[in-house]
Amino acid sequence: MEPFEILLFLVVMVFSILLVLCLLKMFLSQRQEQLIKPALTGTKNVLEACTEAKVKKVVVVSSIAAVVYNPKWPRDVDVDESCWSDTQYLYSREGYWSYYFLAKTLMEREAIEWSRTSSADVVTVCPSVVIGPRLQSTLNSSSLGLLNFIKGGVISLLSDQLYLVDVRDVADALLLVYENQEAKGRYICNSHSLHNNDLMEKLMNMYPNRNFPKSFSERKEKQVNENILRISSEKLKKLGWKFRSLEETIDDSVVSFEATGDLPK
């Protein structure tokens, strides 16, 4: 790949990610079509730019949201890359997060459909909820969710079932699929699957001297009835992907929160 193509590839892909995040925040209270159409238009514009630049490989950052929202998938079968979120199911739901899940699903499908008529290889990576230390000055939504969870015991990571991955491990995954010529198709990027209660217990064990809210111990006693989805990252692991322990990710996140003043020491 020529230097100009590499530069354009990086620019357009970063721009597309920023564009999606801005749209999500902008249309937080808007209707479904006001989010989906601009998101798809932005995706098409990026892919057209890749075509103009004769880019040979495109790595798309999708989301686990494009994978797991499929009520027809058998609960006793591991969720792998063959599973797609059901767009009809998501269309039937309302609310900001349902629109986000739908947007992610349609955007990934758009990229894969484009690859069928393009000379470029398209690889998609579907990370779960991304946490870990941050470089930017502001908190992204998932890090804010973890911070609120630590500070107040608030269930703020979308559901009782948590699927987490370290931001540094996501970066490793993206570089891995970009550099590896054997990388093809979709890749789930998930490190840890657990319940809210399990995360609460881990936090209390890791930081016994921190004053956690009473809601932690109260919620810990509640019975967890819903089975956790078995989400498989085996395809990515076969390429050589490795991930950090949840303890390392949490501890580095806490250090980052403390360094920026978001969390008292």
Image: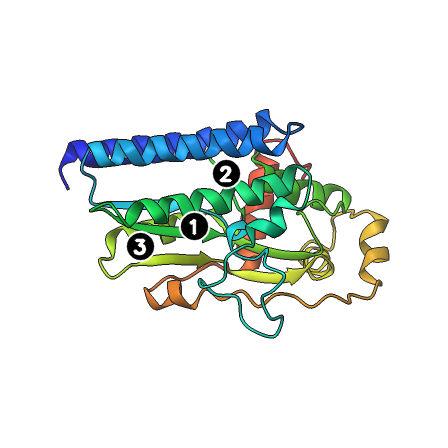
Q: Quadrant of the C terminus?
A: top right
- Earlier residue among tags 3 and 2: 2
Residue that carries the numbered disc 3 in the rendered image: 176
Residue 152 drawn at (x, y percent): 77, 42
Residue 218 drawn at (x, y percent): 86, 56
Q: Mark 2 belongs to which amino acid?
A: Arg
Residue in view at x 25 percent, y 57 percent: 180
| Residue 256 appears left or right of 215 | left
| Residue 103 appears left or right of 204 | left
Residue 94, picture quadrant: top right
| The disc label shown at residue 219, or none | none
Q: Nearer the viewer, residue 108 or 221?
A: 108
Residue that carries the numbered disc 2 in the rendered image: 134
Q: Distance between the Cα atoms at labels 1 and 2? A: 13 Å
Residue that carries the numbered disc 1 in the rendered image: 170
1 or 2: mark nearer the eye: 1
Question: Against 101, is 195 above or below?
Answer: below
Q: Mark 1 belongs to which amino acid?
A: Val
Residue in view at x 44 percent, y 62 percent: 81
Residue 176 drawn at (x, y percent): 31, 54
User: Furthest residue to the bottom?
Assistant: 76
- Tell me whether circle 1 and circle 2 mark residues in contact (CB < 8 Å): no
- Earlier residue among tags 1 and 2: 2
Q: Distance between the Cα atoms at labels 3 and 2? A: 21 Å
Q: Quadrant of the N terminus?
A: top left
